[in-house]
Amino acid sequence: MNSWFTVKVKYTKQLENGTFKRVSEPYLLAAMTFTDAEARIYEELGSSIRGEFQVTGIARTDLHDIFQYDDAEQWFKCKVTYDRIDEDGEKAKTISQNFLVSAAHVKEAYERIEESLATLMIDFNVVSITASPIVEIFPYREEDVQSPVAKKSPAFEEEVQHTPIRQVFSAAGSDLDEDVFDEDSDSTLTDAYSSEEEEELTSDEEETDLED
């Protein structure tokens, strides 16, 4: 089964002013294992990065869905919570899930996550929105074994105003009541974007570090 992985890549980048700088950038991709994630990042970046580059860190990343709009390149991580109700109608527990959405700013990210989750038949709260350092996302591919097909919203055009086209990249088996992450559960995966981990991309339980 596929998972999302954040892969940190170090290489020499040419800046807009023509100078060169050694940078370390995170990419998000779908893969089955850490080894597959490493192999795929070399495949995806091999033709776009000039010269050599190194993979310096790989971390499994807790994301439920990704909503990509064609008019924005900045990514925002949105944390959403909702209450799961048991069969007797009593509140069982609070579920927490992470989403990524592309937007121009935080306000637009909030509006787009509300729009994207509007069809859910539950009440939910957007408890936090933070800018993500992710440079690019490589979603599931049809040719990959056991890879769900990314769902793409129908594209259409208006004569007067362009309406942003949205693509939805779902995590494997991403039904709302499946593969949920309970905040209080010991099995919750480390958030690859949080505070100091955002920079180092380390995970206490599941991470592979590749030395320079």
Image: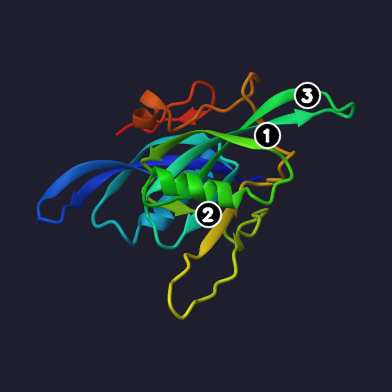
Tell me if label 3 and label 2 are in contact, CB under 8 Å.
Answer: no
Tell me if label 2 and label 1 are in contact, CB under 8 Å.
Answer: no
Residue 184 coordinates in the image, percent (x, y): 64, 18
Quadrant placement of the N terminus: top right
Disc 3 versus disc 1: distance between alpha carbons?
A: 16 Å
Vertical arrangement, residue 28 with respect to residue 18, above or below: above
Residue drawn at the location 57% of the way across and 56% of the way down: 168
- Determine whether the residue tagged by mark 2 lies in a helix, strand or loop: loop
**Does any portion of residue 188 appear in the rendered image?**
yes
| Amino acid under disc 1 | Val
| Amino acid under disc 2 | Pro
In the picture, measured across the screen, residue 65 lies left or right of residue 23, that is right
User: Residue under circle 1?
Assistant: 180
Tell which circle, 2 or 1, labels the residue nearer the N-terminal end: 2
- Determine whether the residue tagged by mark 3 lies in a helix, strand or loop: strand
Quadrant placement of the C terminus: top left
Residue drawn at the location 38% of the way across and 25% of the way down: 195
In the picture, measured across the screen, residue 125 lies left or right of residue 107, that is right
Residue 66 coordinates in the image, percent (x, y): 54, 49
Give the class, few, some or many, for how many residues have Cα within 10 Å of label 1's Cα (few <14, many ≥20): some
| Amino acid under disc 3 | Lys
Which of the colour schemes (rainbow, by chain, secondary structure, one colour) is used?
A: rainbow
Residue drawn at the location 36% of the way across and 24% of the way down: 196
Vertical arrangement, residue 62 with respect to residue 46, above or below: above
Give the class, few, some or many, for how many residues have Cα within 10 Å of label 3's Cα (few <14, many ≥20): few
Residue 141 coordinates in the image, percent (x, y): 57, 59
Disc on res. 89: none
User: Residue under circle 2?
Assistant: 139
Disc on res. 91: 3
Between label 2 and label 1, give the one nearer the viewer. 1
Q: Nearer the viewer, residue 97 or 3?
A: 97
